[in-house]
Amino acid sequence: MKLGFVGLGRMGGNMVTRLLRGGHSVVAHDVDAEALRAAASHGARGVTTLTELVEALPPPRAVWLMVPAGEPTEKAIRELTGLLAAGDAVVDGGNTRYKDDIRRAQELGARGLHYIDVGTSGGIWGLEDGYCLMVGGPQAAVARLAPILQTLAPTGGYLHVGGVGAGHYVKMIHNGVEYALMQAYAEGFELMRGSPYALDLPRIAALWNNGSVVRSWLLELAGAALTDDPELQSVKAYVEDSGEGRWTVEDAVEKAIPVPTITAALFARFRSRRDNSFADRLLAALRHKFGGHPVRRG
């Protein structure tokens, strides 16, 4: 199948390579010239504009976006909307909020264009292992992409989960669960690190991945990180979030459904970015005021 692909970052570039290995033809675009050269070196046709990309594809066209969520994706879709023709499809494989998918599908549908949202999980390992794909959109439009989805995913690794927005909604919840799992591992390993025993944490991670009920790929990655740097001295305790955890918590608030574990994991990330916070200084000052407890002076 011939596919247009926009966005050749860490995941997008690897996805293009996997598609090319699977026998597909890819017309690729990125604002980064080096990323474009890398894709071309693997067999993609690199183009410098979206106009060139659309002109290089036979109708009905399909263009897959792996662009940062928000305005970069909005801008690319606006430009593509003016270039594509009725029957063509736009696929957003980035981390978009599902409500934006619903709006876009209506806007593109008014011009006869199909919109498909694909929640994509797998990170940098997806090139070799395949990507878990959570797909939302019209049945016929999704079915036309089956050869692409089958190549990108491992066996059993993609599912048409529902209508427009469903793919990114499921991916949003996936990432909320991911936050909670990662936080639980982090806290458990910190407890073991502070134990009275000389525990070999990488070996314990490997042990838990053999028959334990907490075995997982995330645990494998934790073991690998601890093997590379047992004290994690090369890593700063500052944890970013890409938005999906926030959206998950906001969705829970809208529905009045309690998700305390996911919420706590999100707030722990916020906490990691605070250095000598005002709140903690106030706590110390209050203890000093009401109980005369000593404080450390800055």
Image (cartoon, rainbow, N blue to C red):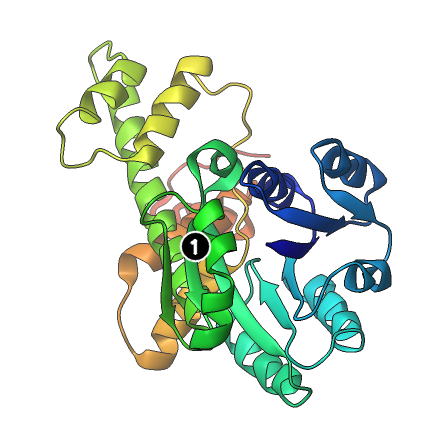
Give how far across and how far down residue 281 sits, in percent: 51, 47
Q: Is residue 9 above or below residue 190?
A: below
Instruction: Please give the residue where the numbered disc 1 appears in the rendered image.
Output: 133
Query: Which residue is at 71% across, 70% downward?
Result: 77
Q: As drawn, is 90 to the left or to the right of 80?
A: left
Farthest residue in the bottom direction? Answer: 110
Q: Residues within 10 Å of mark 1 (few under 14, many from 20)?
A: many
Q: As drawn, is 180 to the left or to the right of 234?
A: left
| Quarter of image, res 225 | top left
| Quarter of image, res 87 | bottom right
| Quarter of image, res 75 | bottom right
Q: Quadrant of the C terminus?
A: top right
Give whichever of 243, 290 is nearer the camera: 243
Name the element at disc 1: strand
Query: Which residue is at 67% across, 67% downward?
Result: 61
| Three-letter code for the amino acid on which mark 1 is drawn | Leu
Give whichever of 199, 291 is nearer the camera: 199
Q: Quadrant of the N terminus?
A: bottom right
Query: Which residue is at 45% across, 67% downward?
Result: 143
Q: Is residue 214 visible?
A: yes
Q: How many marks?
A: 1
Give how far across and how far down residue 84 sits, in percent: 75, 74
Give how far across and how far down residue 234 sits, in percent: 55, 20
Give whichever of 242, 267 is nearer the camera: 242
Give whichever of 95, 258 is nearer the camera: 95
Query: Which residue is at 65% across, 90% downward?
Result: 110
Give how far across and how far down residue 13 sits, in percent: 65, 41
